[in-house]
Amino acid sequence: MQMLKEAIVRNGKAINQDVLLVDSFLNHQVDVALMEKVGEEFAEYFREKNFSCVVTIESSGIAPASFTALEMGLPLVIMKKQTSRIMTGDLIQTTVRSFTKGTSYELTVKKEFLTPGEKVLFIDDFLASGEAAFGMLHLAKSAGVEVAGMGIVIEKAFQAGHQRLVDAGIDVYSLARVKSMSENHIEFLD
Ligand code: 5GP
């Protein structure tokens, strides 16, 4: 997606060869016009499949997933990284290792928001090693729902996530695939 690649080159900052900072347009300050296009692009690609719901992980996945859900006319479910005292009821949880923080968190969703048998589209901001995506897959399986597609805004193609998901039979669509990066250069796959 050309507009996204231009935003990455113009406003993204590779703080080293592994981590790309995109807080000026994706996950802190948000370029909503760009997110609207991101939503349209995912909706176009995944239109043929009959999804019943879009699922994401807080907080960085919320902006792209919201526009995707809006464009597709679907409800959105946000998986939580933290529980709270008011989060009661039947919960499904799995431990996920965070790539950026180097720590683990309990990915959590209320059972009532995922209906067994439904077909969901997972949207996230980044795909790196695939830990978050596999955590989500694990929760989906526990809830009895099928993950029939994954839309990723930025994929770091030099990490293992994409291949791991393809090997698991998932239809992964990434809007920008970063081949390599350094402080002053970002190269894309396509
Ligand atoms: P994975 O679980 O695939 O290793 O990493 C994906 C998650 O880690 C994403 O949800 C994203 O929030 C975060 N992440 C991974 N790599 C980066 C990165 O280079 N920059 C930012 N901002 N987040 C990242």
Image (cartoon, grey):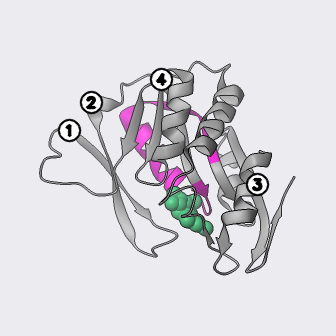
Give the magenta part as a residue range: 126-152
- Tally of numbered tags: 4
Residue on which disc 2 sits: 112
Residue that label 3 marks: 5
**Residue at (58%, 57%) from the top-left corner?**
25
**CA separation, marks 4 and 1?**
23 Å
Q: Do residues under tags 4 and 1 come within 8 Å of each other at their CB atoms?
A: no
- From what the image shows, is residue 101 above or below residue 7? below
Q: CA distance from mark 2 to mark 1?
A: 7 Å
Mark 4 or mark 3: name the one nearer the start of the chain. Answer: 3
Contact check, label 2 and label 1, Cβ < 8 Å: yes
What residue sits 36% from the left and 25% below the top? 115
Q: Which residue is mark 1?
A: 90
The 10 Å Cα crowd at callout 3, few under 14, some 14 to 19, many 20 or more, is some
Badge nearest the viewer, 2 or 4: 4
Q: Which residue is mark 4?
A: 74
